[in-house]
Image: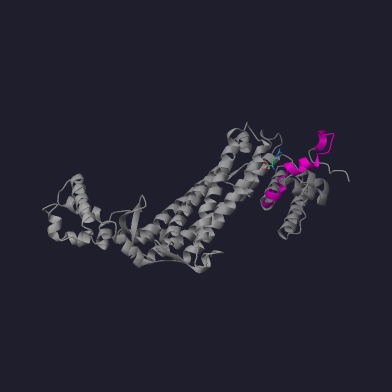
Amino acid sequence: MAAEKKPWAGRFAEATAKSVERFTSSLHYDRRLYRCDIEGSIAHATMLADCGIITRRESNAIIRGLKAILADMEKGKFVFDPADEDIHMAVEKELTRRIGEAGAKLHTARSRNDQIALDVRLYLRRELDNITVLLVSLQKRLVAMAGREIKTVMPGYTHMQRAQPVLLAHYLMAFAEMFSRDEERLLDCRKRLNVLPLGAVALAGTGLPIDRRITARLLDFPAVSPNSMDTVADRDYIAEFNFVASLCMAHLSRFCEDLILWSSDEFRFAEIADAYTTGSSIMPQKKNPDIAELIRGKAARVYGDLFAILTLLKGLPMTYNRDLQEDKEPLFDAVDTVKDCLAIFTEMLAHTRFNAERMYSAAGGGFSTATDVAEYLVKKGVPFRQAHEITGGIVAYCIKSKKSLDDLTLPEFQSFYAGFDEKISAAIKLKNSINARRHKGATAPAEVRERIREFEKRLAEK
Ligand code: ARG
């Protein structure tokens, strides 16, 4: 059988080699854009008729044909021909096969260069909204957990050393803050993404009398892109999204790292339910936090997706180059991975219990209220540096005599600074240490509750 003629074959004397068809095709992954491709083509055909470039009858035939193809694809009844280069060719070829000459007019005043930019923008716009929904439900889960853990005291760490006692609620809300910034970044990315590229055509626009505002309105774009060359060369929105996805994965990964540590026998701060852990094929006693580990691992591949895009763009001459076809797999992978991870993480969190007693007793160790001793002295008028020095001496004394700050008597305190009074024993209690930090952003329960309320209010509107 003779190879099928390509839509661009006019100037070619030979058929494309099979190996080249296989090598250049993106159909096996860009077919996921079929809905966006058809949606864009329907708007384009409508605009062409509105502008008198094709007749209304032709436009209607195109739209009917496209809708029928879409229905077949939705039902999984459409048979893709692997010899087709990409989703655009697959749809257009089938349309022309079904409706004849009118189908061959669809690509008027359009190039695959602006068409692919449109498809990806439509696809990503929808996925940004889906990811936002996932981020919102994760924040809701964190806020609800924080509300329940408002009395749970845990050791806060710096350098992985016990530093100061904090509320577990404060810890959980720290992650709510990160995910709310991820949500904001998605929204910001959406603003720049939400611009109609169609009409840039190959790179220079068209001599035909199109009206891009019509297409923009039909596809719900608030603006049309201002420079046709930039439009077909631009993949900033993919780089931006992959960065936002990477940072979101970093946040998930850091949370997972804590949960992995906290699940260890050494910590026993947290227990992930059996249904959300896995066992070992050799060690019968094992219960492993594999979901958390996999999320930590998957952060690496999303970073890879970001670097693939950045590297793809850096040496490209203006404007469109076929290299840009390589933008889709890293984008799709980042979208799929971040969605998957957000969903399973939120579910796992709902099945994670914290061990308040373990956390409380760990919070008391490591002289975690030493800063409270120093601040007590500052309130007595001692300059902070001196207060730090005095308290350091007290800690050294405790280490030498194997005592905790709580064990010290008032005379022992007074041997370091005469101005200590009996109030020092209250100042170094865990609860009081936490309650004392009552300014905006600090860990006192009233402050954390206030932030929880702000989140609840914002999230309730979503
Ligand atoms: N599959 C191509 C891509 O993803 C579509 C655009 C191809 N344009 C072209 N002139 N070959 O970028």
* Residue 86 screen position, x and y as percent: 72, 46
Residue 413 as seen in the image, left or right of residue 165: left
* Residue 106 screen position, x and y as percent: 75, 45
Residue at x 48% of width, y 58% of height: 136
Residue at x 81% of width, y 33% of height: 11
Residue 103 shows in the view: yes
**Magenta stretch holds residue 20:** yes
* Residue 189 screen position, x and y as percent: 52, 46
- Main SS, magenta region, reads helix
Reply above or below: 346 against 317.
Answer: below
Residue 267 as seen in the image, left or right of residue 61: left
Residue 162 as seen in the image, left or right of residue 411: right
* Residue 98 screen position, x and y as percent: 81, 52
Between residue 212 and residue 29, name the one nearer to us: 29
Q: Which scheme is used to colour this image of the protein?
A: one colour
Residue 421 shows in the view: no
**Magenta stretch holds residue 178:** no
Give the residue furthest to the top: 317
Give the residue furthest to the front: 282
Bounds of the magenta span? Answer: 9-32
Ligand 1, by image quadrant, is top right
Give the residue furthest to the left: 418
Give the residue furthest to the right: 1
